[in-house]
Image (cartoon, rainbow, N blue to C red):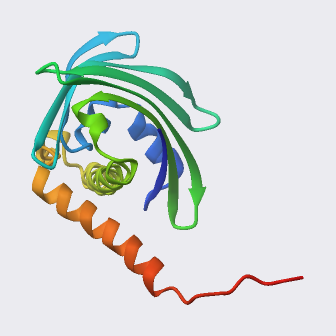
Amino acid sequence: MLIKSGFDVAQPVDKVWRFFDDIPQVAKCLPGAELTEDLGDDKYNGRVAVRMGPVKLQFVGVAHIKERDDEAKRIVVDASGSDEKGRGQASMLVTANLVAARGGTRVDVAQDLQLSGAAAQYGRGMISDVTAVLMRDFATNMQTRIDAADRGLSPDQVEAARSASGFAIAMRAVRLALGRVLRRFFLPYRPPTTS
């Protein structure tokens, strides 16, 4: 399933791109993510924990930086892992493109996500909504970390992104879904035009 999203960072594109060079700091911006070992050659062992409803999924696996194009400001990460309790697998190819935008940087993200097992039982809408919530948190955490570095604070002085709380994410995802439904319901009916 392909999920596209994006966010803005109120910093110059070169500064945001330099932040993407520090993969452990980038990982700390994603709630529930943790790098456990640097394997060298742009490969990392790690884990990601997310609650979706009553199910807590904790994937353990490997992330590999497949491409890093300094000129185009594009990074591609291939990640795959298995749930620690054997309830499924996930793989994801993430492509992030950075472009200068008015007031800072626009980060456009495409995630090609493949799920099996317990995580696959959730519909595309729920997975897209949870992903949207995680991307908003990621953007906020990234902005906070870059701003802290500008103030001379070390990464250790910035609170790490907390584990992705199932209830909080579920509630925010439900709000997104309800908003979509209400917009459809309240949009004025426009009869088809005939030529």
Compared to residue 178, the image places residue 158 above or below, namely above
Q: Is residue 14 or residue 52 the one in the foreground?
A: 52
Give the residue displayed 55% in from the left and 90% down from the top.
Answer: 188
Give the residue displayed 90% in from the left and 82% down from the top.
Answer: 195
Count of numbered marks: 0
Residue farthest along the right direction in this orientation = 195
Q: Is residue 105 or residue 57 the one in the foreground?
A: 57
* Direction from residue 181 to residue 167 in the image, left or right: left
Give the residue displayed 33% in from the left and 66% down from the top.
Answer: 177
Compared to residue 146, the image places residue 37 above or below, namely above
Compared to residue 179, the image places residue 23 above or below, namely above
Where residue 75 sits: x, y (%)?
Answer: 51, 32
Where residue 94 sits: x, y (%)?
Answer: 46, 34
Give the residue displayed 52% in from the left and 45% down from the top.
Answer: 14
Where residue 79 sits: x, y (%)?
Answer: 37, 23
Where residue 120 sits: x, y (%)?
Answer: 31, 35
Q: Give the image quarter of residue 167.
A: bottom left
* Direction from residue 77 to residue 31 in the image, left or right: left
* Direction from residue 20 to residue 95 in the image, left or right: right
Q: Is residue 27 or residue 12 the one in the foreground?
A: 27
Q: Give the image quarter of residue 170.
A: bottom left
